[in-house]
Amino acid sequence: MVRVDGATTRLERIPAKLSGVLKSAEIVVAVASGIANPSPGIDIVRKDPRDAPFVFNTDHYIVVEKLTQHPDYLSFVRRAGVQDSEDLRSALESWVWIIGPKRDPEIHWSKEIPEYIHNAKEKTEPSGPR
């Protein structure tokens, strides 16, 4: 992920939920965006010849960096059957939540890597006022 300061986050290991992707096909590219992006997420593109002619499979994972600021936060709390509190909010703020995969039928199976991923660029300069 690209942090607000423009630096790239390097993962030491892939989270267990995403690691199954490594076993099923060759990974061609993985891109991510952080909170500087209005819709942060992770896209993983795999190449699987068994799906010919649509050999590129794209999975999207939603990234929620501030769960307590999510519009549905209070409904999550109710559904979990817990009491909202400062301690809960503090604990939840220490995690980044990855939700998915979402398989958009428009791009999940494609003959080429989706353009928005193919043309993605690493952010090299921090955004915002200096």
Image: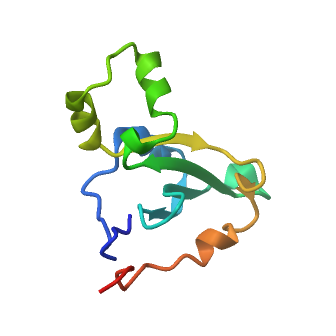
Question: Given the current orientation, which residue lies at the most extreme top position?
Answer: 81
How many numbered discs sit on the rendered protein? 0
Near-viewer residue (12 or 61): 61
In screen coordinates, is 47 left or right of 72?
right
Q: Position of residue 130 (x, y in %)?
A: 29, 86
**Image x and y of residue 126, in percent:** 34, 81
* Above or below: residue 44 compared with residue 97: below
Residue found 37% across the figure and 47% down from its top: 66
In this rendering, is residue 87 above or below 129? above
**Vertical placement of residue 90 versus 34, above or below:** above
9 up-or-down from 108: above or below: below
Question: What residue is rendered at 70% in x and 51% in y?
Answer: 108
The image position of residue 41, as x and y in percent, is: 50, 55
Q: Residue at x 70, y 58 (%)?
A: 55
Q: Residue 95, position in %: x, y?
A: 28, 42
Of 81 and 111, the residue lying toward us: 81
| Left or right placement of residue 89 versus residue 36 in this view | left
Nearer the observer, 14 or 40: 40
Question: Within the image, what quadrant is residue 107 found in?
Answer: bottom right
Q: How is the image coloured?
A: rainbow
- Looking at the image, which residue is at 27% across and 34% down? 89
Quadrant occupied by the N terminus:
bottom left
